[in-house]
Each structure stands twice: as structure tokens, then as C-alpha cells.
Amino acid sequence: MMQFTVQKDVIYNGLNVVGKAAASRGIQPVLSNVLIETIEDNSLKLCATDLDISIEINIPSIIVKKGSITLPSKKLFEIISKLPSEAVIFNLNEENNLMEIKCGKSKFDIKGISASEFPQIEYPESDEFINIDINPLLKAIKQTTFATATYDTNNVLSGVLFKIKENNLEMAATDGNRLTRVKEKIENKEKKDYSVVIPCRTLKEFAGILSGVEDKTVSITVKNSQILFKLKDRYITSRLIEGQYPAYEQLIPKNYEIKAVAEKNSLNQAIERASTMVNERTNIVKMNFNDNKLKLTADTPDLGDSCDEIEVEYTAEDLNIAFNHKYIQDFLKVVDSDKVVIELNGALAGTLFKPASEDDFLCLIMPVQVN
Amino acid sequence: MMQFTVQKDVIYNGLNVVGKAAASRGIQPVLSNVLIETIEDNSLKLCATDLDISIEINIPSIIVKKGSITLPSKKLFEIISKLPSEAVIFNLNEENNLMEIKCGKSKFDIKGISASEFPQIEYPESDEFINIDINPLLKAIKQTTFATATYDTNNVLSGVLFKIKENNLEMAATDGNRLTRVKEKIENKEKKDYSVVIPCRTLKEFAGILSGVEDKTVSITVKNSQILFKLKDRYITSRLIEGQYPAYEQLIPKNYEIKAVAEKNSLNQAIERASTMVNERTNIVKMNFNDNKLKLTADTPDLGDSCDEIEVEYTAEDLNIAFNHKYIQDFLKVVDSDKVVIELNGALAGTLFKPASEDDFLCLIMPVQVN
């Protein structure tokens, strides 16, 4: 009869981390469950998977008797969240898979499913890992995931290209209308090179499970179309997206004819205001660059029109260009720099948006042809 | 050509107040609009209505040229919300009903509908008002609206009974499963007596439009199946629900056989925990009162069961009773008192829940028969 005691806050945090991988509903009920398994005398493994992503965490616990079981992830989390911050005692009746949970004067019996029905998760060998600093990786995730395509999770465009070559990490995402690319220096002592496409959701979940970790680096490895992110007490594994990622490098203009520099906040606010009158089917905001001024306009028949103006650094010829304003705002949201540089090659050419103070991040946005 | 200037924050707050009455969609586009009308040299009336509820507010403004127009409520609010805290200049082109809105370097043209299409709202005469203190009224609204029926907004049970007789205000609500009743002393100098049924939504909107008002009292009058709440700078009028409100007084037991006293918070937490295992179709939590203890249990086949226990003051015989836990929790949410009194007349009789420190508020909840 499996039996252990764990602090409420510890198992609460653990379930919060792995719960993101549990299936919300599905054909296999066990995929909505979290696997609970004693792994050492005072350690408990929690694991959940929807077969796309698996998350696992080890938490400290007092093990009285070893064992394993799976319990409904959401319901268990709900129970634990309502308990006071005290020790919680778990007692499994293995005959009927009924887990008794006791804390103070509260007692619950929750029906589980045998651990033998839980899918086996395979991990790559540990000698193939490379280590990456977490903070620049998080920033690169934030600066790429927003630009992925959302229509089909098996399409390469719904993932983020993740390329390691020597001491360089390059990440890129595109949905065909805009492209974002980040480069970071890393220490690749292990000399492992990869070029894989990671599902957007995997990167977001990875960023999400970092709360409370003290790790400065994450170990990453790729094997059998799977990627594994390993931290001190937790893992996340995920399928990769198969297929050839588009050769985006050739789309990024090497030279530009015209350049504008704008304050990030005033540009964002001006777009925000002009976009109130945007046609919600097209989201088009028209821009006019002329004489150190950027004028923004939008209109919808039957509703009205809007017009805004900000100061920019711009000394080239009068230029009219139009964009889906959401693409520019998505870019501005992930920029730390106070100023942004806009590199233009005319009204119909892909336009580069860059933070003024960051060299290795750029966003290429295709303009929209109007009238 | 109507023309006026108004401070951004002033019109923002005004639109926020009246916007709640604008129709979100409907057959008559003008009902989604807000009426803007100059009423004095430096005052502007904003008004919106969905024909059920009308809200009106007067705001200070510099009027250059008088006039009136209706503009799309949501879109106008969106525009104003994005402007800096500065003066906003409005200029109406009466030929095409196009309102120009200017603030700093931002300019909008928004298409309106002639004010002549806006429904005329009639107000009762002012000599029929009675004045009620706002704070006790707000408390009574909070303690009744939650118990109204939600199925049909024309049914009297979907409203709150609002009865003034001499210096007493009585409000009551019931959905057939529970009943809540509040009594407040008021100063009814005007000697007007009413007994009307106010739609639940009207009372909630009334509570909602009070932000920022300095009024201590509200003037209320009833006429032609309409109720009017009048504050210094704003009105809300609403239809009343026609029909006979049930004679609920006779349902409230005058005497009780058994009494229990519980701490509000510990009772709420114990219900919260026990209810994790509740059958979501019935929401039934079973209670056992015995020997200064209250035991709570719930179960769902295939999921599991829960059990909790708290100390209560209870010295009568062992009693088993069951409730929809949401009804008890709804009551506990609106109670200020630290302790609640439960007055019982056996397992099948309506049970009274009262705050220990408030005499004039009670909630009658019907138990559920189990097994």
C-alpha cells in the first residue's frame, strides 16, 4: 500500500508545473491523469503527458511505502489548492486504486488509474546534452513564438526554427506575412549542432514551467524527433515538427534604401489610436513618411476614419506604405529598446523592424498593397 | 455645427457610466449609440438606453455651439480611452452627421445617427421622490440580487421585490430554492409607499454607476411601470416587472426547533473543500450536525468522495441534512458578520441562515432530500 507525506505547497507547485501537459480531455482517460511515483526514499516523481508534450518534476516527500498511481490531474490540483499549508498524507488502496488524501480534518478518496496504463516516456542519453543560459533563451522565445502560423500544428510554420551551430543559437519564426529572427551567442562546449523545428506550444510551456527554479542554464538534447529540456528538478520533452523549414535568410534584405527611426512608445500609441478606425477584416493602417514626420491613417466605410502623427527621424523622399497594424504591434511588444529602426525598400518591399539597441533581433513585415 | 470641448477623463467617465445601458446589438442601430446633447452653456448630457434601462449623466464641457447627435457607444469609448489626458475638441458636420474628434495630433471622424432617431425617455415628476441613503441600499442590493431566478427576465422571480412602507424598506428575492430578505430603516419624510419588482440587472447597474459620486442619498420614484433613481449628476430609469410577487413572508418559519452557530470562514472553507467531490449535476453536500461538530460529505461515483469537519455550537440531537452547496456559499459571500446562525426544523424543512450580528437579513434555503 503506497503511502507518503508531502507539504501542501510543494505538491501544489509540482502539480501546477506538470498539469500543463495533461490532456484536457481525450480518448485515453489516463492522459488526463498525473503519474505519481516514488523514486527514492524521499523523492516523488510527478509526470503528465498528452503525448505531444511531457512534463516531469521531482519533489521532496516522506515516503513510507513505495508505489505508483495516476490520479485525475485537474481534480487533484483542485483538492490540493483548497488545503491549508500543512502536511498532506497520501494512502493508496491498491485493490481499487482509491487514493486517500488527508490534511487536518479534511479527507478525500479519489479514484485513480493504474500506473501501468500510463505511457512510457523515453529520454535521450545524457551525454548528448548542450547547456544554454536560460535568460537569453527566454528572450529569444518571447521574440519568436508570436510570429508562428496558427492554422496547423503539423506544419513547420507553426513551429520555431531552433538552430545551433558552433557558438551561435539562431531562432526564427514566420507565418508567411512576417518573419522574426533572433541570434544569440552561446557556449557550445559540447560542439553539438542542431537544426530543428520546435512546436510553438512547447516553447511557451517551457517558459511557463520556470517559475521558482534556481537554474541558470538548461540542458537541451534532440533525439528521435524529440527534444528534451532538462532542469535540476524538472524535464520537458516534446515532439519536433518534421519537414524542411523555409530558407528565410534569402528573404531578409541585406541593404535598404530608406531608414526611419521612431520612439517605440509614441509609435505604439499612434498605431493604437489610428487602429480604432481600422477595417477589422483587413487591419490595415496606412503610413506616410515625410520630412521627419510619420502620419498614420485608417478608415472603415460607414464607421469613419482616424489620423495620427508622430515625429520620426526621416529625411528621404515622401513614402506611402500600409501594414496590418497587428504585426507591427506584436513586434513592438517584445522590444526592450526605447527606439526602433525601420528599414524600407519602397512601398511594396518587405520592411525590416529592429530595436535600435539590439543587433541580433529583427522582424521582417510584408506591406499591404492599397488602392 | 455643434461644437464643444471636454476633458478626456470627464467624457471617459461619462461614457463608462452610460455605456452600460447601450444595446450591444439589435434591430435599431441607434440603441447602440450614445446621445450627446448640449443642455446648458457649459454642460453636456450623455444618454444611452436599450429600452429596458436608460442611463443619463451630465458632464461639464465648454460649449461653443449647441446641438445634439448620437455616436456609436463602444467605438466612441474606445477612441476616448486611447487619448492622452487632455482637452478633446468635438466638431459636428450636421450635413452628414460626421463628428470630428481632435486631441493633440490625433483626429477621428466618426459617423453618427441623428438625435431625432433616439428614443424619447420620459421621467416622472420630481415631487414624487423619496430619498434613501445609498450605503444601506447598496448592501441590500448585494444581499438580494444573487438569489433571483435567471431563466426569464419577465418573470417576477427574476426581479427583486422592493417595498417601502412608512419608514421601512424591505427587499426580497427568491428563485424557488432559496429566499433572501433584507429590512432597512429609512427616513420616508415624503410618506410615499411602494411595492414594486425591480429587474435584477437594473439594481446591479445602479450599483455599478455609483463610482466617483459624492451623493449620500439617492432619490427614487415610481410611475407608469418605471422606476427612476436620481443622483446629482446622473439618472437611471428602468422598466419594472409586472405581476404579483409571491407571498414569501408565510414561508419564513417564525419558530425553529434546533439552532447551530458556526464561524463564517471555517464553514465556507469546509464547504469549499467538501464540494470538490460534489456531483456537478446536483451540487449536493451532506451535513451531519452532532455534539458541537458539523461534518460535511460529498461524493461522485467514478470520481471519489470527500469529508470535512468543523466545530460548531450545536447541542441538539444528531441531524442529517443536505443542501446545494452553492446556495449556502452565495449567502456566506454577502455576510459581514464573523459568525452565522443556522436555524433548523428537521431534515426536510426550509433552513434559515442568518448573520449572527445582523438582525434584518436572512436567507431561507430548502434542503435536498437524499436516499
Image (spheres, coloured by chain):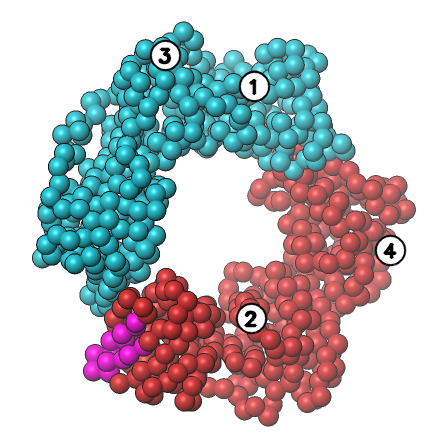
Chain colours: A cyan, B red
Q: Label 3: which residue?
A: A189
Q: Which residues are magenta?
A: B90-102
Residue at 70%, 76% (x, y): give it.
B169
Q: Which chain does the numbered disc 2 sit on?
A: B
Of the residues shown, which amino acid type is indicated by label 2?
Answer: Gly
The label on residue B31 is none
- Label 1, secondary structure: give it: strand
Q: Nearer the viewer, residue B244 or B339?
A: B339
**Could you tell me how far apart the alpha carbons at marks 3 and 2 are, in whole angstroms?**
62 Å
Of the residues shown, which amino acid type is indicated by label 4?
Answer: Glu
* Residue A298 appearing in the image: no
**Image location of residue B273, percent across then percent down:** 67, 39
The label on residue B257 is 4
Q: Nearer the viewer, residue A258 or A120?
A: A258
Q: Which chain does the numbered disc 1 sit on?
A: A
CB under 8 Å between discs 2 and 1: no
Residue at 24%, 44% (x, y): give it.
A341
Query: Quick one: label 1, few (<14), some, or many (20+) residues within 10 Å?
Result: many
Looking at the image, is mark 4 or mark 3 nearer the viewer?
Answer: 3
Left or right: A211 in relation to A196: right
Q: Quadrant of residue B128?
A: bottom right
**Could you tell me how far apart the alpha carbons at marks 1 and 4 are, in whole angstroms?**
54 Å
The label on residue B212 is 2
